[in-house]
């Protein structure tokens, strides 16, 4: 690069934004020309093409992203930075597909824009690696305009055109599978299958057969050949949920597949090509599991090519109202009564800590749509589910243990103050914990009572008695994942 100042062309229909941004970029040593329409942009390009173009999306005479797509052909060396107040995943992906060098959601930090301009001047924009997405669904389930979610959108937008392996981390209920589906639905493999496998829901001894398939007679009960998830997802995306629960022997085999791109079924000899994109997810800290010897370090690095960390809902409270309204709208679309939220109800929701994250909020909105007495949900109705001050009255197993126990005690003190002194607290709490614990372990072990009992350190007969006492019928329990 030379020391000559760079010429920046800024396109925005808001005169105040043009003034503030231009002043900031001029302080950085650039020559800045500002215009307010696409027509003026065209005139400036004919007169003297800039070194970097910074453009808004919604302009009086057209769409800035459509213009960016045209400029990618007409001026392939021109880096384009897109600004937009439409802070959705759709906009981020459209900007990337249009060939934008960077995408900044409004409001943006001026230092961030200055850094993006510097980066654009160092590295000239390249043409997009993939064909444009035919259509992008504006109703994608990832909702949020907070800075934390904008960061997530920007990473997703940059990886959809690649086959890079992605590791999505975050607490339970933050939407990890939604991210995986968005990456698949917006990528070049979108016409092929999206196959999900939850490691916590499969008995350890069956995980390899689930992943790679098995031949007839490979083990007891294998009456015929069965294709595994790698084969079922051929050409598409394989989503490995709760990857931190994968047993070590399966980790070793998965690592070999990621290294070689080939595998054999359990009991088979034929080499099969693994033509899939891998997206893995976990609510655990894999780096800590590596340190404790529970997860292979080499597999961790193979999976952690593009990390995406989903923020818990308590760290993006400004998205709560948007999400709540979205879930109520979706409930109405599904045939439930149409409801809205009072201002006081929204304040209560925004003050809640949401240990169950977005999933907890969605469940609350659907329940309120069904049980709410009026068309407008007020704060009083929500307190019955969340507890006073936004603390929810739920079983301990549904939330963080320490926080849930304290919330439970506060509820007992509020609703049954005598119980705080009558010597029954221990038995009451154990009764609330025991049922979800037993049900969760039965789910984890495919309703096999012997394995569930061993995992909990119980005698099988003791477990059977507790099932009878609690009225749990393992024969009709759904086979699924741990909550």
Image: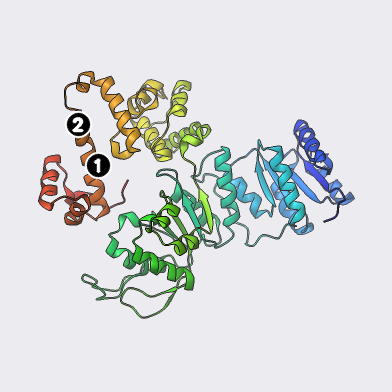
Of callouts 1 and 2, the N-terminal one: 2
Q: Residues within 10 Å of mark 1 (few under 14, many from 20)?
A: some
245 vs 215: above or below: above
Q: Is residue 459 left or right of residue 74?
A: left
Where the C terminus falls, by quadrant?
top left
Disc number for residue 130:
none
Q: Percent position (x, y) of residue 96?
A: 64, 52
Whole-angstrom CA distance, mark 1 to mark 2, is 16 Å
Q: Residues within 10 Å of mark 2 (few under 14, many from 20)?
A: few
The answer to whether any part of residue 393 appears in the image is no
Give the residue pinned by disc 1: 436
Residue 73: name its quadrant.
bottom right
Q: Is residue 471 left or right of residue 65?
A: left
Tell which of 127 and 149 is nearer to you. 149
The answer to whether any part of residue 306 appears in the image is yes
Tell which of 287 and 113 is nearer to you. 287
Give the residue pinned by disc 2: 426
100 vs 62: above or below: below
Q: Percent position (x, y) of residue 357?
A: 42, 38
Which residue is rendered at x = 26% and y = 21% of the image?
415
Q: Is residue 200 left or right of residue 439?
A: right
Q: Is residue 176 left or right of residue 106?
A: left
Q: Percent position (x, y) of residue 329?
A: 46, 35
Where the N terminus falls, by quadrant?
bottom right
Report helix, strand or loop for mark 1: helix
Residue found at the far bottom of this picture: 269
Report helix, strand or loop for mark 2: helix
């Amino acid at each position: 690069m030379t020391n000559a100042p760079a010429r920046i062309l800024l396109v925005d229909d808001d005169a105040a934004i043009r003034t503030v941004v231009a002043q900031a970029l001029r302080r950085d040593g650039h020559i800045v020309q500002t215009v307010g329409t696409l027509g003026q942009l065209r005139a400036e390009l004919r007169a003297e093409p800039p070194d970097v173009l910074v453009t808004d999306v919604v302009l009086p005479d057209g769409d800035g992203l459509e213009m960016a797509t045209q400029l990618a052909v007409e001026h392939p060396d021109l880096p384009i930075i897109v600004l937009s107040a439409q802070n959705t995943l759709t906009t981020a992906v459209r900007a990337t597909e249009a060939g934008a060098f960077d995408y900044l959601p409004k409001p943006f930090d001026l230092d961030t824009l200055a850094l993006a301009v510097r980066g654009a001047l160092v590295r000239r924009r390249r043409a997009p690696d993939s064909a444009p997405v035919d259509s992008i669904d504006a109703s994608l389930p990832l909702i949020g305009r907070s800075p934390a979610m904008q960061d997530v959108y920007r990473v997703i937008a940059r990886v959809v055109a690649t086959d890079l392996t992605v590791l999505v981390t975050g607490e339970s209920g933050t939407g990890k599978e939604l991210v995986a589906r968005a990456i698949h639905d917006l990528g070049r493999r979108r016409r092929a299958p999206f196959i999900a496998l939850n490691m916590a829901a499969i008995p350890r001894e069956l995980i390899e057969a689930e992943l790679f398939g098995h031949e007839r007679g490979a083990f007891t009960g294998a009456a015929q050949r069965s294709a595994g998830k790698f084969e079922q997802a051929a050409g598409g995306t394989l989503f490995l949920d709760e990857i931190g629960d994968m047993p070590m022997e399966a980790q070793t085999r998965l690592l070999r597949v990621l290294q070689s791109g080939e595998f054999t079924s359990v009991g088979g000899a034929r080499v099969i090509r693994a033509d899939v994109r891998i997206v893995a997810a976990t609510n655990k800290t894999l780096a800590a599991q590596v340190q404790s010897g529970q997860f292979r370090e080499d597999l961790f690095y193979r999976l952690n090519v593009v990390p995406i960390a989903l923020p818990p809902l308590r760290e993006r409270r400004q998205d709560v109202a948007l999400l709540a309204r979205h879930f109520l709208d979706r409930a109405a679309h599904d045939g439930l009564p149409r409801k809205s939220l009072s201002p006081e109800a929204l304040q209560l929701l925004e003050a809640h800590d949401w240990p169950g994250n977005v999933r907890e909020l969605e469940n609350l909105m659907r329940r309120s749509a069904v049980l709410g007495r009026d068309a407008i949900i007020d704060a009083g109705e929500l307190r019955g589910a969340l507890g006073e001050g936004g603390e929810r009255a739920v079983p301990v197993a549904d939330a963080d243990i320490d926080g849930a126990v304290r919330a439970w005690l506060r509820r007992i003190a509020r609703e049954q103050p005598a119980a705080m002194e009558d010597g029954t607290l221990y038995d009451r709490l154990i009764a609330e914990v025991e049922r979800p614990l037993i049900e969760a372990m039965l789910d984890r072990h495919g309703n096999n009572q012997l394995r569930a009992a061993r995992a909990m350190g119980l005698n099988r007969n003791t477990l059977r008695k507790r099932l009878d006492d609690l009225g749990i019928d393992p024969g009709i329990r759904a086979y699924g994942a741990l909550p």
